[in-house]
Image: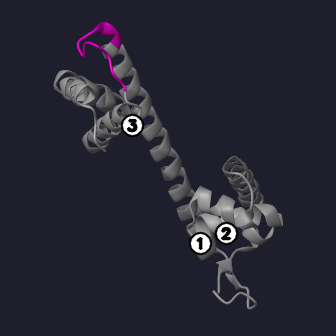
């Protein structure tokens, strides 16, 4: 993407002035150097994409804006990682449940997907979401497209399915 020379000079000046400060803010939030570096890069890409420009890169307004961008970028990255870890954790728990219980194979399914009685007890709309996210390893967006529902609906159904399965485990 070709930037106008003023904006290019502005982004370059911001990088020189704020890169280390941005890294420290990101590191304080993420507690991981690699993720902090990614957050700084994402923040600068946002600045470029949104064509941010201040007359002076060293102005207080510019500094506040850039630090707000890195803070929000870092928090978004943190939340994204946290949610990914929840899904991985749930998938590992599901694999443990599958290993502990008798596995039932659906002979009508060409792919031979196996599931537990616990998953079979879920209503169809929740089962479909868990199957897409955990068994088939689809993303939330892919699951939403496949099932013809919104991404928010996928997340909510997944949350409810996990709750139902936890309650089912407590009863066993």
In front: 99, or 77? 77
Residue 54 among magenta residues: yes
Determine if residue 122 is in view.
no
Q: As drawn, is 86 to the left or to the right of 5?
A: right
Between 101 and 34, which is closer to the camera in this rendering?
34
Question: Residue 49 appears at what percent x and percent y?
Answer: 39, 37
Q: Do the residues labelled 1 and 2 touch (CB within 8 Å)?
A: yes
**Alpha-carbon distance for marks 3 and 1?**
34 Å
Q: Is residue 38 left or right of residue 104?
A: left
Label 3 Cα crowd, 10 Å radius (few <14 / some 14-19 / many 20+): few
Residue marked by disc 3: 49
Q: In this view, does 172 lie to the left or right of 9?
A: right
Q: Which segment is the magenta one?
A: 52-61
Earlier along the polypeptide chain: callout 1 or callout 2?
2
Q: Is residue 55 visible?
A: yes
Mark nearer the N terminus (2 vs 3):
3
Q: Quadrant of residue 113?
A: bottom right
Q: Mark 2 points at which residue?
A: 131
Residue 88 placement (x, y as % from top left): 51, 58
Quick check: 61 above or below 131? above
Position of the N terminus, as image quadrant, is top left
Is residue 3 a member of the stretch shown in magenta? no
Inter-mark Cα distance, 1 to 2: 6 Å
The residue to which callout 1 is attached is 136
Cβ atoms under marks 2 and 3 closer than 8 Å:
no
Q: Residue furthest front?
A: 4
In this view, the residue in front, 94 or 3, is: 3
């Amino acid at each position: 993407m070709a930037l106008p020379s003023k904006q290019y000079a502005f982004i370059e000046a911001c990088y020189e002035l704020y890169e280390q400060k941005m890294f420290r803010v990101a590191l304080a939030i993420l507690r991981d150097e690699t993720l902090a570096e990614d957050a700084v890069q994402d923040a600068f890409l946002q600045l470029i994409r949104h064509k941010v420009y201040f007359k002076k890169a060293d102005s207080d307004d510019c500094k506040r804006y850039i630090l707000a961008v890195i803070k929000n970028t870092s928090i978004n990255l943190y939340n994204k990682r946290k949610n990914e870890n929840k899904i991985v954790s749930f998938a590992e728990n599901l694999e443990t449940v599958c290993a502990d219980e008798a596995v039932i194979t659906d002979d009508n399914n060409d792919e031979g997907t196996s599931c537990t009685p616990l998953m079979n007890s879920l209503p169809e709309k929740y089962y479909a979401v868990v199957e897409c996210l955990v068994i088939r390893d689809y993303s939330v967006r892919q699951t939403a497209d496949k099932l013809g529902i919104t991404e928010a609906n996928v997340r909510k159904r997944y949350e409810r399915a996990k709750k139902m399965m936890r309650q089912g485990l407590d009863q066993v």
